[in-house]
Amino acid sequence: MDVSPNAFDLGGEGAVSHKVALQMAHGARHHAGTEVSLSITGIAGPTGGTETKEVGLVYVAVTTHDGRYIVRRNDFGSNDRIENKRSFVQFALRMVLEILDHADDIEMRRKKAEQRRIVDDENETTEQDEWDGAEAWEPRGISRAEPSSVDFSAETDWD
């Protein structure tokens, strides 16, 4: 999966890390020729945990063909192995849905921006805004502002 061998060297980040999860996802997407890939690396238990990486720790990475990616860490605690695996997969699939939803949002924004550009080009005006002090300003022409979308999914407790 094209994971750098130095991640496993003494003093390296180890198999359960942000770096390895991202490299695994990039490698999987490259080798499979897909538009989206995901990787999961974690400690499901009941053994394998350490002082710095406890049972229930997981890193999930999702990558897309256009260069976008998400890598997140979560700690599901010391549940049994089956429950941890289930939690890891649910966490990963939610991240895939999040990146796919965001892709739709990006495409929609691109289309809206192109439509505004066309309309603005058609309605091009040479008028200038005039400002005669704080109380007498009047805008001329077109002024637009759109609210930004806020992604609270990182702050959401999915359980």
Image (cartoon, grey):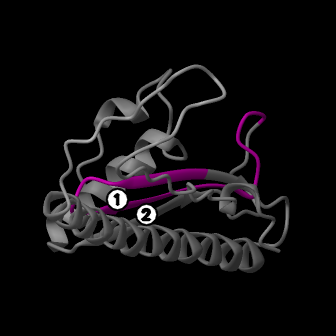
Q: Earlier in the sequence, mark 1 or mark 2?
A: 1
Residue 123 appears at what percent x and percent y? Answer: 20, 61
Residue 44 appears at what percent x and percent y? Answer: 68, 64
Q: Residues within 10 Å of mark 2 (few under 14, many from 20)?
A: many
Which element type, helix, strand or loop, lies under badge 2?
Answer: strand
Q: Amino acid at mark 2?
A: Ser
Magenta range is 51-72
Q: Quadrant of the N terminus?
A: bottom left
Identified at 29% across, 62% down, the residue is 113
Identified at 14% across, 64% down, the residue is 122
User: Which residue does the numbered mark 2 point to in the structure image?
Assistant: 39
Against 13, residue 124 (above or below) is below
Of 91 and 114, which appears nearest the observer? 114
Residue 98 appears at what percent x and percent y? Answer: 52, 70
**Is label 1 in contact with label 2 (beta carbons under 8 Å)?**
yes
Of 31 and 105, which appears nearest the observer? 105
Residue 78 appears at what percent x and percent y? Answer: 85, 60
Identified at 42% across, 49% down, the residue is 143
User: Which residue does the numbered mark 1 point to in the structure image?
Assistant: 25
Indicate left or right for 79 with 29 as reference: right
Q: Quadrant of the C terminus?
A: bottom right
